[in-house]
């Protein structure tokens, strides 16, 4: 098992789409065991610690059939990829029949080859796990009906969109508390002890073929959320919560396995306490995209230990593409912000090259889009520079940027620092579309009155300032709209 760093950089890859494009380029069959070295190079740029191969498990033929009959989905597919054919609609990767590597991707041997290739590069492998539901043609539906939320024949007649009559049992269709049931999945019962044991067994098996899992909508299995969602159908909650029971059981066999929670509704802290290593920071995503710098700054005042276990991102397969939602200059400023904050960071394949189409996960093909080579170079420089610097191995601290009475633009400037064995580092971001100025006081009195060199981690620009200035009135910064500084601070020896 590849041990991921304390704050890993994760690259999400849509496995089927990526393999299809590799095959188109090479003209050869491209299961996971057939991928050439240069294709692996493309998804493992310097600074990436783990690859999340999204969608490797066996998808449900029955779920695919439901998707093909859903006209709203077919319309969305055609809008995303004009001319998409039925043979290019694979079905949802979150409608899983079995947790076995899909034969179309090379099966178990292909997955093992992919893991070995990544491991040879010192890069970990993350895979999906969907704890809330399974496909209607999962073997569990007939073999273990006790694993599911149950209904009655009257339920199935009254509300067939919410209940599935299998002929031997009536089972609830999967849902969360805020939306109608999903038609292509069946709801597991988080309170059932046998289901908890079965989940532990499945995840233990998954832990033999990867280094960690991203758990889909993990909060739905929490005792209080599950009880509110299902009411009397859920019966009385057990004394112990779902995730401590399951994760504890898995870690008896795989103590180093990484658990990442897709989490919403401000439940990140609770899920961390229940055993997850990292939880999605959707709140930061929303604030960066839709709110002002004051809101982002307030978010970053949370306890540092909590922030170290968040997953920061600007896009993933559930969100619109950053190049579509953000002004190019803001996209770069936001990327600097994400890359230099504490916590894991998540980057979505195609984000580095400016893809704009948000692809439905059901599809095997995406539209051709020209690569933004300058944006790719920027991201490669950013990830590599932050990685080489070692800044995120130190201690992190949020800083203030002070203005003056006739210039309040400092309110748009965010600043933080890192200090540790790799050295001292400062990030300053103008999170606004107007120029901004201010002073950032550094928290290191040991700088004394000596001269210190400030070197750009990304651009190699150099400045010399005295310790008295840096720790007294503070470093003066003047930034263009969406401007940034990422600076290494060391003695000036010239």
Image (spheres, rainbow, N blue to C red):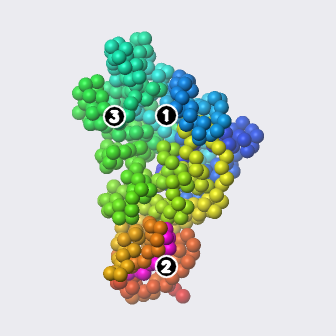
Along the horizontal axis of the image, is 76 left or right of 238? right
Along the horizontal axis of the image, is 258 left or right of 376? left
Q: Main secondary structure of the magenta part?
A: strand
Residue under the point 31% across and 59% down: 302
Q: Secondary structure at mark 3?
A: loop
Nearest to the observer: residue 14 or residue 290: 290
> Quarter holding the C terminus?
bottom right
Residue 179 showing in the rendered view: yes
Magenta span: 474-486
Residue under the point 75% across and 38% down: 28
Residue 116 coordinates in the image, percent (x, y): 60, 44
Q: Residue furthest right?
A: 27
Q: CA distance from mark 3 to mark 1?
A: 18 Å
Tag 3 near tag 1, CB within 8 Å? no
Residue 419 showing in the rendered view: no
Q: Secondary structure at mark 1?
A: loop
Query: Is the residue 292 above or below the residue 3 in the image?
Result: below
Q: Which residue is mark 1?
A: 94
**Callout in the foreground (1, 2):** 1
Nearest to the observer: residue 145 or residue 220: 220
Q: Which residue is mark 2?
A: 454
Residue 264 coordinates in the image, percent (x, y): 37, 45
Q: Within the image, what quadrant is residue 71 found in?
A: top right
């Amino acid at each position: 098992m590849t041990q991921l760093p304390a704050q890993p950089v994760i690259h999400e890859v849509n496995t089927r789409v990526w393999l299809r494009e590799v095959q188109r380029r090479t003209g050869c069959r491209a299961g996971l065991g057939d991928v050439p070295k240069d294709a692996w190079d493309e998804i493992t740029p310097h600074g990436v610690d783990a690859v999340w191969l999204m969608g490797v498990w066996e998808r449900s033929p029955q779920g695919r059939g439901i998707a093909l009959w859903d006209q709203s989905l077919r319309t969305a597919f055609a809008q995303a990829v004009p001319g998409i054919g039925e043979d290019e609609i694979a079905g949802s990767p979150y409608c899983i029949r079995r947790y076995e590597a899909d034969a179309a991707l090379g099966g178990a041997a292909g997955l093992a080859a992919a893991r070995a290739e990544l491991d040879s590069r010192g890069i970990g492998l993350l895979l999906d796990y969907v704890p809330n539901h399974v496909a209607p043609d999962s073997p569990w539906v007939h073999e273990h009906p006790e694993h599911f939320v149950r209904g009655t024949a009257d339920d199935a007649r009254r509300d067939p969109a919410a209940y599935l009559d299998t002929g031997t049992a009536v089972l609830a269709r999967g849902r969360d508390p805020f939306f109608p049931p999903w038609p292509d999945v069946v709801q597991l019962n988080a309170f059932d002890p046998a289901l908890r044991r079965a989940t532990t067994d499945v995840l233990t098996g998954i832990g033999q073929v990867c280094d960690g899992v991203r758990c889909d909508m993990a909060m739905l299995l929490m005792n209080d959320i599950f009880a509110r969602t299902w009411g009397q159908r859920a019966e009385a909650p057990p004394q112990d919560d779902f995730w401590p029971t399951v994760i504890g059981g898995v870690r008896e066999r795989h103590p180093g396995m990484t658990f990442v929670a897709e989490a919403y509704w401000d439940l990140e802290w609770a899920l961390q306490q229940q055993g997850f290593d990292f939880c999605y920071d959707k709140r930061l995503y929303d604030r960066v995209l839709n709110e002002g710098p004051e809101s982002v700054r307030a978010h970053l005042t949370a306890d540092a230990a909590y922030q170290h276990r968040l997953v920061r991102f600007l896009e993933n397969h559930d969100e619109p593409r950053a190049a579509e939602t953000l002004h190019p200059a803001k996209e770069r400023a936001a990327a600097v912000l994400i890359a230099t904050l504490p916590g894991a960071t998540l980057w979505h394949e195609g984000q580095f090259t400016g893809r704009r189409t948000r692809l439905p996960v059901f599809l095997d093909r995406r539209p051709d889009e020209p690569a933004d080579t300058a944006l790719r170079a920027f991201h490669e420089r950013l990830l590599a520079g932050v990685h080489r610097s070692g800044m995120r191995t130190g201690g992190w601290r949020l800083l203030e940027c002070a203005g003056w009475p006739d210039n309040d633009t400092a309110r748009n400037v965010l600043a933080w620092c890192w200090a540790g064995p790799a050295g001292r580092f400062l990030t300053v971001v103008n999170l606004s579309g107007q120029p901004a100025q201010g002073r950032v006081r550094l928290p290191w009195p040991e700088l004394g009155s000596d001269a210190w060199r400030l070197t750009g981690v990304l651009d190699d620009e150099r400045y010399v300032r005295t310790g008295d200035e840096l720790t007294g009135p503070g470093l003066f910064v003047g930034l263009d709209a969406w401007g940034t500084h990422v600076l290494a601070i060391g003695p000036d020896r010239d």
